[in-house]
Amino acid sequence: MRLSWLGTAVAFGLSTVALGAENAEDLVSPCLGVSTTANATLTSVTVATGLSSPLLVTAPPADTKRIFIVEKAGRIRIHPRGTSPATLSTFLDISSLVDDLGFEMGLLGLAFDPGYASTLHFWVNYTETVLSQRYTVVSRFTTSATDPDVALPGSEVRVLRFPQPEENHNGGMLAFGPDGFLYVFTGDGGGGGDVHGTCGNGQNKATLLGKILRIDVRGIDPDPGAPDCGGPSAIYGVPASNPFSDGPGGSCDEVWAYGLRNPWRSSFDKLTGDLYVADVGEVCWEEGNFVAGGTGSARNYGWRQMEGSHCFNVNDQAQCNPVGAICAGSPPCNDPSLVRPVVEFSHGEGCAIIGGYAYRGCRMSSWQGRYFYGDFCPGFVKTFTMAGGVPTSQQDVTAQVDPTGILPGGFGSFGADAQGELYVMSLGGTVLKIVPPFADLEVSAPGAANRLVLSRNGDWTWENLTSATDVPVSYYRVYRGTPGGSFACVRKALTPSWPAPGDPASPPAGQLYAYVVTAVNGLGQETVRGAVGTFNASTCP
């Protein structure tokens, strides 16, 4: 072939012909081989459907080919990236163990071992009922050594179990922190107003309810304490640096922070280690809390003395800012020791906050560091950037992320995959992936795992945009032209390839051909063609 240059779909220039393509599956970093976009707006695509009350999307570290979807009833499903939304397999089914009859009960959390590639361990958080008594259970499971798509149901090792007095306010999120310890986010035990105990469970450090727990399930602390309040079968270490470790009795040694009502989704910023905790309100106020990386232990978030940044009085619950209650052993309302939220909104705007993630994905450079959160009832999705401990650049992106309106009244949760890309899910059974608008994407852009290449057998290949992004593609266009001049479409391809011998045309003597490949979706939208000339799509065969 008399070719000297092959075009990419980038805005600035062309790349030389290469023999062979780098295999994205062999890359060490989850972001290697991912081309970035500078999109200022967002959209979403449906990646999975037909699910039963999906509550979480996650993936093992560096596993860029699959997402794992937690279903409330007790199943974890696998969806391979870039496949039909109906493509699902069952990774683990523990529905026989899980009691999901209450609206806030079920399989609620999943966290993969940071060293999952070698240990094959992961932890789940679920509710069970035994002889009418409800419990929260945190268990470790192991994946089959011969089939990475199947976990072993019989491998369960229960590491933590404690009773729940009511069916609601179970929290349920599990997350490994930058320190390698497992953080367990628990609700206050349920009912209304946290009426359990003298001043409520949230303020009682002798219970695991209404807390952020920090435990060592991986054996990394050189001098761990013994389990304190995790039940007779507890098998974990208590990090020596936990703030309330005082041995048996007294405060629960597992407690890292307290004063929470029902934290529904918390996450660590992968870059900074900052912690975001969304705590569902009681009568009037929803709140989002922020803990800068490297700080935050021993914090008291105020419940039930406060709801958000306002006083709460268990004897006057209808008031949105009543006179604070005095309760022996708990700080009073507005005490300086109580941590105020960084985000708060009233029940005129929402009813149950849903925490998300600080975006640290590979693809959208303009959204780096922006925190996403939402609310169950209106189904809104909003973002902000933390700067100096204060949320800034707040933005409502609901219409962009959920243009068909499937989230209001059934917004289940956010999720994040191994590349840091974000998802939202409807309890109705659909998972959406937040992506750039189609016109901002590029085929074989710089940094892509599969550039436009000429293989040894003469085939032309380029990036499979659907596999790379989950965004559906109807077909590809191959343009031929000269840099700075005109480009005409010379091929319309349903697959990302042009079988040998590729383009049969040859450039005039002393001249070169350049090529640009784009993708077109079902709406007729086309990806970036680049600022390398003018383009004529009407010439497509």
Image: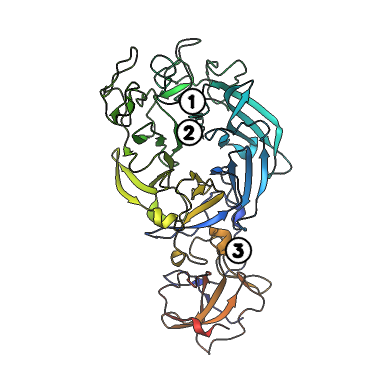
Residue type beneath disc 3 = Ala
**Residue 177's mark?**
2
Q: Residue 244 sits in which quadrant?
A: top left
Which residue is rendered at x = 48% and y = 24% of the image?
Answer: 189
Question: Is residue 114 at least partly visible in the picture?
Answer: no
Residue 14 vertical placement versus 161 (above, below) = below
Q: Nearer the viewer, residue 348 or 531?
A: 348
**Residue 214's mark?**
1
Number of other residues with Cα within 10 Å of mark 2, as a class: few under 14, some 14 to 19, many 20 or more:
some
Q: Nearer the viewer, mark 1 or mark 3?
A: 1
**For mark 3, what is the residue?**
21
Which residue is rendered at x = 56% and y = 72% of the image?
Answer: 476
Circle 2/circle 1 CB separation < 8 Å: yes
Number of other residues with Cα within 10 Å of mark 3, as a class: few under 14, some 14 to 19, many 20 or more:
some
Image quadrant containing the C terminus:
bottom right
Q: Residue 155 sits in which quadrant?
A: top right
> Marks 2/3: CA distance?
36 Å
- Mark 2 and mark 3 lie on one chain; the one further toward the N terminus is 3
